[in-house]
Amino acid sequence: MNMKKMGKLVLSALSVLGLAACAVGSTDEAFIGESQEKLINGTSFYGSDTLYNATTAAIAASGVTGLTYLGTGTGRGEQCLEGTGSAPCNTKAQTIAPMSRDLNGTCDSGQKSNRIALDAVYVWSDKVADQSATGANSANVKGAFCGDGDGDATSCAAFDTWGEFTSGSTNSSAPLVMYRRDDLSGTTDTFKSLTGCTAFCSNVQIVVDDETAGPRLSTDTPGTSSLVPTPCAATDSATDCIGKLVGANASAIGYAGGDAKVASGTYENKYLWVNSKEPSVTNIRKLITDPSNAYPYARFLYLNEGNGTRDIKEQDFLDWAFGVNDINDAIAYENILIANGFIACTDPANSPRTPLNCGSTGTTCPSSL
């Protein structure tokens, strides 16, 4: 059974037992339908939606039973590490969180910042056969999604067609159709910090995770989705869904992590180059070796640790992922990350192989790696 669907069934069963849940707040909307999770420490845990598929596969490969990954967003995972969110995250409900950005603010005693791989915030569009544009400059990416940075309507209108956004498009007069992740997303945090956006244009549609309906637009009634069953499936993450949405519409663009790639079929998509830089393995790895020449939206991915009381199943999964008992476990974890479109920080062909070797954290938090 699909792990996300299994998670929904587990949560529904817990609901029958009468365990209460509250909605998650957001600057965009009140997350009601998708936030009925009954998070039990060490059983279900939140974190990056970008890392949903990879983390689900890693839990299965680790052999650890009793863990269900709920995704939803980096921000939600961090809230549950620190006990700063709405229930069940008003206490330190978990001690590990896959994240698509680092921990915010000052590191608390006992927290760990663990870089595990590289990724990028990709700007996705329909496949070449349907949309001939291949790139855009960073100023126009910012303009399309947030105008002058604060979502001003006049500045947004200057970038709302394909001809205003970039050259070489299939239909320069076509209005841009745009999708983004919600404000619990670490991908959104990263996009805003790298582009200078503080608020988005009103025509950018927000794709959120709904634990009942699957991915939906923020304007859909919680518990229902206008995106399911086509082009998205109820078991898709929001990242998966954005990849399909742009692959279904030659006028669409959306930002998301590497897991949004659809390599073939009805919803095949492609990434756009930014500032004449391809988001290639070489250009993304330059974030470590030559940051000024890296793809502009390159970033690290994390498996961060909190300082609450850790369940043994969390510890077993962490030990497996980090190769505490066998380096081949860390290699297996890195291989799963690679298989899901992410980039190893060091070349896996190197001998000896050094999995998860992504350098210092860049924060005041120590690392377990």
Image (cartoon, rainbow, N blue to C red):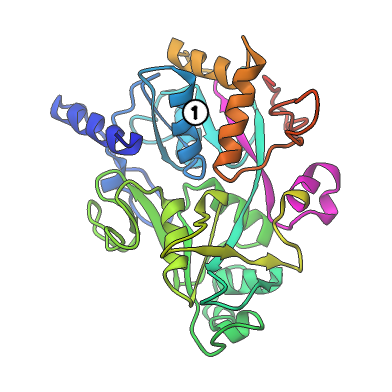
* Quadrant of the rendering where the N terminus is positioned: top left
Identified by mark 1, the residue type is Ala
Q: Nearer the viewer, residue 229 or 32?
A: 229
Say which residue appears at 34% left-offset and 29% top-offset.
88
Q: How many marks?
A: 1
Q: Is residue 284 above or below residue 92?
A: below
Image x and y of residue 5, in percent: 29, 38
Q: Quadrant of residue 46?
A: top left
Q: Is residue 288 magenta?
A: yes
User: Looking at this rendering, what residue extends furthest in the bottom direction?
Assistant: 173
Image x and y of residue 12, in percent: 20, 33
Q: Quadrant of residue 84?
A: top left
Say which residue appears at 53% left-offset and 33% top-offset.
98
Q: Is residue 284 magenta?
A: yes
Image x and y of residue 173, in percent: 53, 90
- Is residue 14 something one can see in this rendering? yes
Q: Is residue 38 above or below residue 209?
A: above
| Element type at mark 1 | helix
Q: Is residue 236 left or right of residue 48?
A: left
Image x and y of residue 37, in percent: 30, 34
Q: Is residue 15 left or right of residue 91?
A: left
Q: Is residue 90 above or below residue 264?
A: above
Q: Is residue 105 left or right of residue 220?
A: right
Say which residue appears at 76% left-offset and 68% top-offset.
276
- Is residue 84 something one can see in this rendering? no
Q: Which residues are magenta?
A: 283-306
Q: Residues within 10 Å of mark 1 (few under 14, many from 20)?
A: many
* Quadrant of the rendering where the C terminus is positioned: top right
Write down the residue under mark 1: 58
